[in-house]
Every structure is written in structure tokens, then in C-alpha cells.
Amino acid sequence: MSVFETATARTVARANATVRLCAAREALWRAQRDQADARRSPAEAATCDRVGAATAELVAREQWLHWIDHGTTIRPAADGEWGNTEATPAPSGRPAPRPRSVP
């Protein structure tokens, strides 16, 4: 794969992630508006569930866009054993050097 193909794929992935993030944000706004309209009604519990699901989707989309941009999660220290060992600080307190790609 050439450098151009990698850059193009990265650009396409970022564009798709941005579109999905915007859609998730709009879905959360709709769910919050529906929840406000359903206060003190039998539908309030269902709208609360929708707000929770929309919030989780939005957080996942934000995390994915951050991963595409930076190659790490938003909070790498919180990843625990699943985290990227290269992104965790070295014992000296400085981040470990990132491996370089070989053409």
C-alpha cells in the first residue's frame, strides 16, 4: 500500500467518523427534546432509555474519532490491561517513544 493510499484511507475514515459523530449528536438532541416533552407522562421512562443510548453512542463516536486522529483512546491510563502499552508513560514519567513506520 502506498503512502497516498494510506493517507486517502485515513481521510475517508476520518470523514466517515465525523459524519457519524454529527449524526449521533443530532440523535442525542432529538432524544433530549423528546424527553423534555414527555416529562410526567407514561413515556418518560422510555425516553430516558433513549437518551442514555444516544449518550452512549455519542461517547463511542467521540472516542472513535479521537482514535483515528491520535491512535490512542481519550484516556489511555484508564484502559488498563487492554490499553496500548506504547501510549502509557514510561517509569521515568515521560511517554514511551512511538514506533516509527517502515516504508
Image (tube, rainbow, N blue to C red):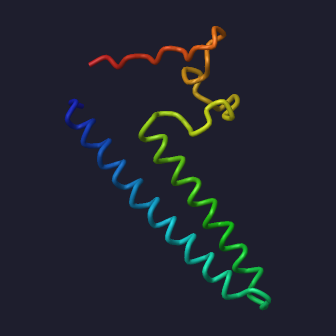
From the viewer's side, name the closer residue of 90 and 102. Answer: 90
Residue at position x 32%, y 41% from top? 10
Where does residue 20 sit, x and y in percent of width and height?
A: 44, 60
From the viewer's side, name the closer residue of 88 and 36. Answer: 36
Q: Is residue 82 above or below residue 58?
A: above
| Quarter residue 100 falls in | top left
> How many numbered marks have been drawn onto this rendered protein structure?
0
Where does residue 11 sit, x and y in percent of width and height?
A: 29, 45
From the viewer's side, name the closer residue of 66 and 12. Answer: 66
Where does residue 18 sit, x and y in percent of width and height?
A: 40, 55
Q: Is residue 1 above or below residue 55?
A: above
Question: Left of 31 or right of it: where is 8?
Answer: left
Residue at position x 29%, y 43% from top? 9
Name the image quarter holding the C terminus: top left
From the viewer's side, name the closer residue of 33 and 3. Answer: 33
Q: In this view, does 102 lie above or below 34?
A: above
Residue at position x 79%, y 89% from top? 40
Name the image quarter holding the N terminus: top left
| Quarter residue 53 falls in | bottom right
Residue at position x 42%, y 39% from top? 69
Question: Left of 26 or right of it: where is 42?
Answer: right
Where does residue 32 sit, x and y in percent of width and height?
A: 63, 75
Which residue appears farthest toward the bottom when viewing the image?
41
Q: Is residue 80 above or below residue 100?
A: below
Question: Left of 87 or right of it: where is 16?
Answer: left
